[in-house]
Amino acid sequence: GIAIPKGVTTIGERTFQFCYSLKKVVLPGTLEAIGPYAFDGCKSLTGIAIPKGVTTIGEAAFGGCKSLKKVTLPRGLEAIGDMAFNGCRNLTRVTIPNTVTAIGAWAFQYCHSLQRVNIPKGVTGIGDGTFNSCYNLTAITIPDTVQGIGETAFQYCYSLTSVTIGNGVTTIGDYAFNDCKGLTSIVIPDSVTTIAKHAFDGCTNLRLLTLPAGPQEPPVLPSGDTQITVIPDDLLPPL
């Protein structure tokens, strides 16, 4: 293992990249930023506690840390970069603090073991592929502050059975929920004005899709024996 000395404020780009045997790192309380690819490919790293002074985690900072099972993200963190934890296939749970406003594209892609993750209020968008191939993710709640769900954002999340989309979302990107075979129903809020054609392609167990009233073209739905009831939300009974 290694202990970064007190006084260090930034871990620079690619500082520990491909340190394959590195198992433990202790970060100082003075740290403010973790640079791009800082620990990329540290495949033996099992856990990391990020101190509360850190505000940004750079692009692919922990990419390919396939032994990483636990990460502690501090209150005060503002941005998680593109591909920050991409390929951390043994990471089971992440708690994202409410101070985070930006989660980058492909940030948690290929986190195959991830079962639970929260998206805090304040996040304004979910980027392309952010949770792509999180095979064991079971539920997701998208807060009202999110305006867009990017392309392939939840593609191949086979275990996803519960999706709550906030009332601020206006766009759902292409293949956003592609092959989410565990989904049986989903409600699209009135705020949504654009649903990409293949947003729900491959959702073979989807049975009930509630769409907002409006002129937008309906998305492509799974073909074959799947019977889907599409209900415009202006026809729903009052609560």
Image (spheres, helix red, strand yellow):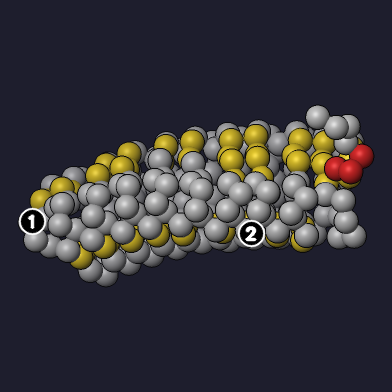
Q: From the top left corner, tell me how far across and down residue 146 is, in percent.
A: 59, 54
| Residue at the front extreme of this rendering | 238
Element carrying mark 2 = strand
**Residue occupying image coordinates x 34% and y 54%:** 77
Is 117 on the left-hand or right-hand side of 69?
right
Q: Disc 2 vs disc 1: Cβ atoms closer than 8 Å? A: no
* Earlier sequence position, callout 2 versus callout 1: 1
The residue tagged 2 is 148
**Residue occupying image coordinates x 83% and y 54%:** 219
The label on residue 98 is: none
Residue 148 found in image quarter: bottom right
Q: From the top left corner, tell me how far across and down residue 186 is, in percent.
A: 74, 39
**Residue occupying image coordinates x 42% and y 47%:** 98
Q: From the top left corner, tell me how far across and down residue 212 is, in percent.
A: 83, 49
Element carrying mark 1 = loop
Q: Residues within 10 Å of mark 2 (few under 14, many from 20)?
A: many
Q: From the top left corner, tell me how far across and down residue 107 is, in percent.
A: 46, 56
The residue tagged 1 is 6
**Residue occupying image coordinates x 58% and y 34%:** 138
